[in-house]
Image: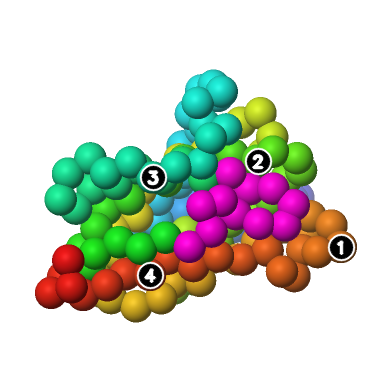
Amino acid sequence: MNKYEIRVIVLAGLLLSAFFFAILYNDFSRNIDVPACVTYSGTFKVPHVKKLDRSTYEVYGVAKMWAFTPEDLTFPEGSTIDLYLTSDDVVHGFNIVKKGVNLMAVPGATTKTTVTFETAGVYRILCHEYCGSGHQYMMGKITITPKKYY
């Protein structure tokens, strides 16, 4: 091998190491959660909220042109929400602003993530995947109320 081939191999090894380090850093120090895929069944097609205990909820959401259902959700401060999401028609994006939640709503599939809301406020939900001509109107909100109101 000549010296240029050795340089390319060393450079490729360094880049691979940098990418591997970046993945490990984001996984362990920044606590980025990867959404899970759940086995799809017809029960996920009916949007509803289920209260499991004082601060734990399950939300079964359905995305369809051009709305998320349920659209407006209200929970007390400190709530933990297991969010199950599917789609009725096309691929939609699901982003909870200020929380780093980014899901894809795919027809025939269900994605799941868990979110904890520690501070009161209004968290906007936006569709970040172009889904048709009314895409800009596809949004919702999660309202977190202070504990003294619950």
Residue 19 against residue 51 in the figure, above or below = below
Going 54% across and 21% down the picture, which residue do you hit?
A: 41
Q: What is the C-alpha distance between the residues marked 4 and 2? A: 23 Å
Sequence-wise first label, 1 or 3:
3
Q: Residue 79 in the image: x percent, y percent?
A: 24, 58
Q: Quadrant of residue 131?
A: bottom right
Mark 3 belongs to which amino acid? Answer: Val
Q: Residue 22 in the image: x percent, y percent?
A: 47, 59
Q: Quadrant of the C terminus?
A: bottom left
Residue 106 visible in this rendered orientation of the protein: yes
Task: Please provide the residue range marked out in magenta.
Answer: 62-72
Q: Which residue is at the front of the view, 12 or 21?
A: 21
Q: Which residue is at the front of the view, 39 or 141?
A: 141
Q: In this view, does 45 lie to the left or right of 33?
A: right
Sequence-wise first label, 1 or 4:
1
What secondary structure is marked by label 3? strand
Q: In which quarter of the image is the N terminus?
A: top right
Residue 4 visible in this rendered orientation of the protein: no
- Neighbourhood count class around disc 2 (C-alpha, 10 Å): few under 14, some 14–19, many 20 upward: many
Q: Residue 43 in the image: x percent, y percent?
A: 50, 26
Going 74% across and 52% down the picture, which residue do you hit?
A: 65
The residue to which callout 3 is attached is 49
- Neighbourhood count class around disc 1 (C-alpha, 10 Å): few under 14, some 14–19, many 20 upward: few
Sequence-wise first label, 4 or 2:
2
